[in-house]
Image: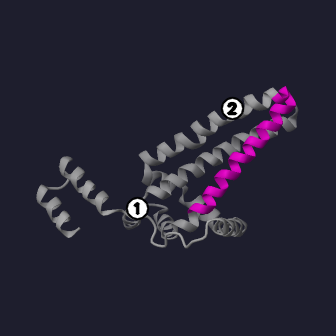
Amino acid sequence: MTTGDLWLGLLVVVLVAVAALLAMAETALTHLSMSRAIAMEEEGRRGAGILRRLLEARENVLNPVLLLVVVCHLSAAALVALLANDAFGPLGIILAVVALAVVLFVVAEAAPKTYALQHTARAALLVAPLVGVLARFPPIRLLTWALIGVSNLILPGKGRAAGPVVSEEELLALADVAVRADVIEVEERTLIRSII
């Protein structure tokens, strides 16, 4: 194993770590509500202002994050395949790809996304400064914009301008769950049902 191979191996580790951080960012920014971000900003939490601004333009922030996750995964896979081929030949490539798939799934997807779901506000505050810089970086913004344009050629349409929506059935189900959990009273659920 050469010094160059060691550097490539280190680069793979860095790419997996960056992919994990970006996966956590994606999940945290997708699941954190705007009202929670505003509340954290009013509490004076460090980074909450940046986080609120990111959530105001969530679609402009998430696309660069997703692009960079893909780039990290593909770059790590290419480097691992290169190293495995040099060390073990074609069979090494197959084994390395399987091993990397496991590592990427566990370390760069499942673990950071689970953490972000369990600690959404903390994770969002942690990644907000980095994501803010990446989302404003002109080459990434331009490339993301161009790729979204290509995507729109394949699947034309305006998308969802209003963002995520909740159906009436989901709101009513949430009210039912809240009553069972003693979060709201039965009368409050009745009021919610009458409004909807």
Residue visible at 21% across and 53% down in the picture = 176
Q: Which residues are magenta?
A: 62-90
Corner quadrant of residue 66 = bottom right
Residue that lies at the very extreme toward the left in this rendered image = 187
Residue 9, position as x, y percentages in the image: 77, 37
**Residue placed most toward the observer, 42 or 88:** 88
Cα distance in 3D space between marks 1 and 2: 37 Å
Corner quadrant of residue 154 = bottom right
Residue 195 against residue 185 in the figure, above or below: below
User: Which label was assigned to residue 146?
Assistant: none
Quadrant of the frame with the N terminus? top right
Q: Pointer 1: residues within 10 angstroms few (<14), some, or many (20+)?
A: some
Specify the amino acid type for callout 2: Val
Residue 1 seen anywhere in this rendered image of the structure: no
Which of the marked residues, 1 or 2, is nearer the chain's N terminus?
1
Residue 143 seen anywhere in this rendered image of the structure: yes
Query: Which of pointers 1 and 2 indicates the residue nearer the eye?
Result: 2
Q: Which residue has dot 1 on it? A: 33
Residue 168, position as x, y percentages in the image: 29, 63
Q: Is residue 173 left or right of residue 127?
A: left
Residue visible at 38% across and 62% down in the picture = 36
Specify the amino acid type for callout 1: Ser
Residue 99, position as x, y percentages in the image: 68, 31
Q: Secondary structure at mark 2?
A: helix
Residue 61 against residue 126 in the figure, above or below: below
Q: Which residue has dot 2 on it? A: 98
Q: Pointer 2: residues within 10 angstroms few (<14), some, or many (20+)?
A: few
Residue visible at 70% across and 40% down in the picture = 13
Corner quadrant of residue 128 = bottom right
